[in-house]
Structures are given as C-alpha cells and as structure tokens.
Amino acid sequence: MWHEERHTRIRDLLRSSGQVSVERIVTELGVSRETIRRDLVELAERGEIRRVHGGAVLTSDEPPIDVRHATRVREKRAIAKVVAGLVESGQTIFMDAGSTMNVVAEALATRSGLTIITNAVDVASRFAARAGNTVHLLGGRFDAQIGCTNGATTVAEIHRYQAHVAILSPVGVDAKAGASSFELDEVEVARAMCANARRVILAADYSKIGVRSRASWCEPERIDVLVTDRKSEKSRAFAAVRKAVGEVTLA
C-alpha cells in the first residue's frame, strides 16, 4: 500500500470514529505496527493528528490548507494539465475551493474566453488577472481559513446559473458512494454545482481513489470524467471506480 494511501485511510478512520487505536489501524490496513507508528508520527508532525496512548485523534476535520497545498503537487499539476485540455473557449465553468482547484485554476488561467463561477477567492483571482475571462465570485459566509464562501447564500447563487462544466475535487471517490467530502458546507456547494452543470469533471489524485468520506454529493454515474494520476491504477479500488463512473482519464 502506498505511503499516501495509508495516510488517507488513517484520516478516514479518524473522521469516522474521532479516535482510533493502533491495533485497529493495523487490522484495517494490513500492515505492521511499526509502519503505522511511523505514519502516525509523520501525521502528528504535520499537525493533522494528535497521538494519544495506544492510538491517535484528529486535531481538525481536514489537514490545514497549507499542508494540502504542499502535498502531491506533481500529481495535481499533471491532473490539472489534463483537465485544462477538456475545457473549450466560451464555456461557463463551476469551480469549487481547495488545493487541487488552485492548481487547476493555474493551468486554466492561461486560457481566455471563459466564464468562471466559483466560491474560491484564489481561483477567482487567478482568472481575473488575465484579460478575456469573466469571473463571478459567489457571495455567502466567508471562511478565512480556506479562502472561500459557503452556506445557504452561496448555494442559492449557484442555482441562478447553468454551466457547461463543473470541475470539482472531492475528499474521496468510491464506486458506490461516488464523490464525497467531509465538511457539510463544501458538500452542499459541490452538490449544487453538479445539479446545475451539463457535465461533471472530477480532479482527484490517487490518494482519493476508493475513499468514502462523511457525505456524498455526486453519484458515480453522474461523474462524466474522473481525471486522476497513474498511481491510482495500483489502488485496489481503482477497477471498481473505473467501471462505475462515465470515463477515467489518467494524467
């Protein structure tokens, strides 16, 4: 099992239970206690978890945004390049918030003739800096930690638009649950964007394949294209995910 895949599985166990023992992680992942202990030390050093006697607890619901920005950057850039190739000039595009979306925005911002509708300040700023694109930053309750808006006002604004494409990044993609995320505010935004787009494109690196987070927001058959990296092929869940969604493109 890949290093980052173990970390993702550990996070998912913690999100489900709040606290998890080393013994349970060893049983669930099928690896040695020493491997798990090293993983927990690394996650604790990154500030994602707190080690307690016999196990670990979450320090927050998701890793800090600066941690996510610095994680799997090469894979995210490869995915972003492929996603950019799926977009045509003249299209209206929904984009949500997150570290992967920032990288996708960087790749797409070299294009012109796009209309971007987003709740993410960083995404809006990248497109607004280039002439020829139209940007709509959705209103709502501002989350300074993530740099995005959310809540009922944001969701209501999304329903005013009809987009050609929704480009979104989940916490996990599962063959049965589809796309899912942990934060309920993020879930409602993503769900509304899916409902108001003709086509749904997911950008998700290998660590998200086979992961089922707290709340689903897009059924697998509604996912038109899943763009992921080639390490995903080594995931035990990859074949089932590939069969469940419309199309999988490897970066």
Image: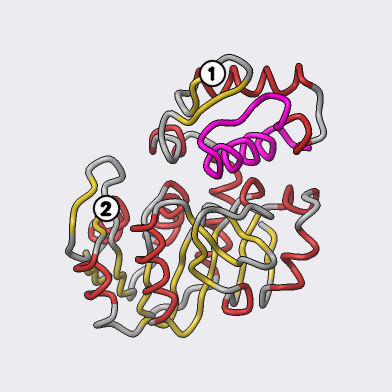
**Where does the image place residue 212, in percent across and percent down from the top left?**
61, 55
Disc count in the image? Answer: 2
The residue positioned 37% from the left and 74% from the top of the image is 192
Q: Which residue is mark 2?
A: 148
Q: Nearer the viewer, residue 34 or 75?
A: 34
Q: Is residue 82 left or right of residue 184?
A: right
Q: Which residues are magenta?
A: 1-25
**Where does the image place residue 124, in percent across and percent down from the top left?**
27, 59
Q: Is residue 246 magenta?
A: no
When asked about the image quadrant of residue 43, the answer is top right
* Amino acid identity at mark 2: Cys
The residue positioned 50% from the left and 65% from the top of the image is 84
Judging from the image, what secondary structure is the residue with disc 1 in?
Answer: strand
Q: How far apart are the two marked residues, 2 and 1, measured between alpha carbons?
A: 30 Å
Q: Which mark is residue 64?
A: none
Q: Is residue 69 left or right of residue 56?
A: left
Q: Mark 2 near mark 1, Cβ–Cβ under 8 Å?
A: no
When asked about the image quadrant of residue 74, the answer is top right
Image vertical order of residue 203 relative to residue 193, above or below: above
Q: Residues within 10 Å of mark 2 (few under 14, many from 20)?
A: many
When asked about the image quadrant of residue 13, the answer is top right
Question: How would you classify the magenta stretch by its main secondary structure?
Answer: helix
Quadrant of the image containing the C terminus: bottom right
**Where does the image place residue 148, in percent across and percent down from the top left?**
27, 53
Q: Which residue is mark 1?
A: 51
Q: Earlier in the sequence, mark 2 or mark 1?
A: 1
**Where does the image place residue 130, in percent across and percent down from the top left?**
27, 60
Q: Is residue 20 magenta?
A: yes
Quadrant of the image containing the N terminus: top right
